[in-house]
Image: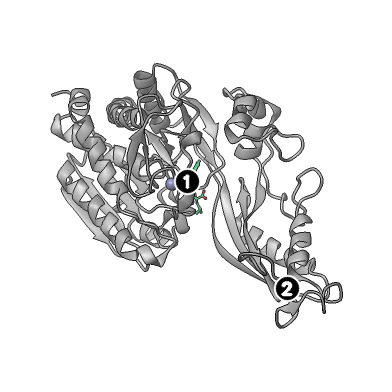
């Protein structure tokens, strides 16, 4: 049976298996889910074996394991390395989900009239990396696997991939490949397919501001002693000026400016600002002066508070002047910003703007480098041809605002530009309640990946 026939006749099973994987709450950020994260790793290993891998192993790390699998048809054939992650973001706040996050359901939506699977991790990244497992299975079953294939599926991407660098550096031979495929990004839409060629990096910080040595009565002391929450808010507000430009000295020193021509091309991508605003229910967009929304997300760095807390947040009112205030602050970075350097600049600046009367502590959580990948490589050309075949339209290269720290590491350590072959949409609600992944995106992704293998083999033979 031909690959596409096999996919069509097995599509219900392919969906049901993904649903089984989505039922495992593999939240890497929360130790409460530790056993489930390990369980998801086992599930991935078993799936690779069932799909036809010769090798499928759980590789322990200091944190959650990396699942490695391979099928070497013939060492002289090109080899494709697939990277993905089986861990997911926390599902909180649970009360904002229309159905429980780990009880997947298929529902029709305006954007997905043929249905979408609603569950945490459906698009990020279980539904996306699992397309590769199913494409591999379909190619094996139809006797049409034209390349060797290796899988490296990790369990710590959503918490910064702390143990992955070591694994990659120590296993260069094992991971040797001719191209790396990653499906963990978006396309513009089903009618405007695209391939991501840029991702932002990140520096994630946490700050603590301490005022008096204990919580105080806000009547007895209010107005006479610095309130750390008020102070923290002022300090945070000062991190951007009236043009939404970040005020940390040296922050922009290494930012690559694009030429007018490059910016022009980036802005040619289909983008409906009105629709973007409507979908988010905001009356207008917002951001750094002088840049379009596509540019603000794709080629400009930014700084956002991800959480802020302190004082009394329980029921009713309590008149307290708190002793401490905290915030988690992350910065999205662009080439050639170095996240270690940016973390240091942030720390020095944040401490320098602390007023008298408070003490400030700054901690760096994790980070990752930004990356730009080639759109002229043999791998990119094969990815482009496969998408054109299945979607009937040549994909547009885009730059996205999210981060996948391993991409820059792959470039540095394995000398290879990964293909960011995502089939999700930006409306899939990644990291939000009601995350979902289109059934059609899943099935077309599987077909496109199988087509990629065929095109990659053909183009590699020619080059
Ligand atoms: N799949 C995302 C990355 C992504 C999202 C790329 C949207 C392009 C568009 C990935 O799983 C993710 O969320 N990464 C984290 C990385 C961080 C924890 C270092 C992110 O971007 O916040
Ligand atoms: Zn992801």
Horizontal relation, residue 430 to residue 271: left or right: left
- The residue that mark 2 highlights is 320
Horizontal relation, residue 185 to residue 323: left or right: left
Horizontal relation, residue 280 to residue 40: left or right: right
Which quadrant holds residue 317?
bottom right
Q: Residue furthest top?
A: 392
Please state the horizontal and vertical placement of residue 299, each as a whole percent of the image.
Answer: 63, 39
Q: Nearer the viewer, residue 89 or 137?
A: 89
Numbered badge on residue 337: none
- The reply to whether residue 148 is visible in this rendering is no
Q: Residue furthest right?
A: 224
Q: Nearer the viewer, residue 296 or 21?
A: 21
Mark 1–mark 2 distance (CA, rounded to whole Å): 33 Å
Q: Residue furthest front?
A: 316
Q: Nearer the viewer, residue 90 or 168?
A: 90
Number of other residues with Cα within 10 Å of mark 2, as a class: few under 14, some 14 to 19, many 20 or more: some
Q: Nearer the viewer, mark 1 or mark 2?
A: 2
- Please identify the quadrant where the N terminus is shown: top left
Residue drawn where x is 38% and y is 66% of the image: 32
- The residue that mark 1 highlights is 433
- The reply to whether residue 220 is visible in this rendering is yes
Number of other residues with Cα within 10 Å of mark 1, as a class: few under 14, some 14 to 19, many 20 or more: many
Which quadrant holds residue 435?
top left
Please state the horizontal and vertical placement of residue 200, each as a whole percent of the image.
Answer: 57, 45
């Amino acid at each position: 049976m031909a690959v596409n026939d096999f996919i069509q006749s097995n599509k219900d099973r392919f969906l049901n298996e993904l649903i089984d994987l989505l039922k495992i709450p593999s939240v890497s950020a929360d130790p409460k889910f530790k056993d489930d994260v390990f369980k998801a790793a086992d599930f991935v290993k078993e799936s690779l074996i069932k799909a036809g891998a010769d090798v499928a192993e759980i590789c322990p790390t200091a944190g959650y394991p990396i699942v490695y699998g391979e099928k070497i048809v013939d060492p002289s054939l090109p080899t494709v390395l697939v990277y993905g992650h089986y861990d997911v973001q926390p599902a909180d706040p649970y009360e904002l989900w229309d159905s429980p996050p780990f009880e997947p359901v298929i529902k029709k939506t305006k954007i997905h009239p043929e249905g979408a699977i609603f569950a945490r991790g459906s698009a990020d990244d279980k539904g996306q990396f699992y397309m590769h497992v199913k494409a591999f299975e379909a190619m094996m079953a139809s006797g049409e696997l034209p390349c060797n294939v290796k899988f490296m599926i990790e369990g710590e991407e959503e918490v910064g991939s702390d143990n992955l660098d070591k694994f990659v550096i120590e296993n260069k031979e094992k991971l040797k490949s001719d191209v790396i495929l990653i499906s963990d990004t978006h396309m513009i839409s089903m009618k405007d397919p695209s391939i991501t060629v840029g991702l932002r990096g990140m520096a994630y910080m946490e700050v603590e501001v301490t005022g008096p040595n204990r919580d105080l009565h806000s009547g007895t002391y209010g107005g006479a002693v610095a309130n750390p929450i008020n102070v923290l808010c002022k300090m945070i507000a000062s991190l951007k000026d009236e043009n939404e430009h970040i005020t940390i000295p040296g922050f922009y020193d290494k930012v690559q400016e694009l030429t007018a021509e490059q910016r022009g091309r980036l802005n040619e991508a289909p983008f409906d600002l009105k629709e973007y605003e409507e979908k988010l229910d905001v009356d207008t967009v917002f951001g750094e002066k002088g840049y379009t929304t596509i540019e603000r997300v794709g080629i400009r760095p930014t700084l956002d508070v991800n959480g802020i807390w302190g004082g009394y947040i329980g029921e009713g009112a309590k008149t307290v002047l708190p002793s401490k205030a905290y915030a988690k602050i992350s910065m999205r970075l662009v080439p050639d910003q170095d996240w270690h350097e940016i973390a240091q600049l942030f720390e020095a600046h944040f401490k320098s703007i602390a007023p008298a009367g408070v003490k400030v502590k700054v901690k760096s959580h994790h980070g990752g480098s930004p990356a730009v990948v080639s759109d002229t490589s043999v791998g990119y050309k094969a990815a482009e041809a496969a998408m054109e075949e299945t979607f009937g339209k040549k994909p547009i290269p885009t730059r996205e605002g999210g981060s996948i720290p391993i991409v820059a590491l792959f470039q540095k350590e394995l000398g290879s530009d990964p293909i960011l072959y995502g089939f999700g949409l930006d409306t899939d609600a990644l990291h939000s309640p009601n995350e979902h992944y289109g059934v059609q995106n899943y099935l077309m992704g599987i077909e496109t990946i199988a087509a990629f293998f065929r095109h990659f083999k053909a183009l590699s033979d020619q080059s």
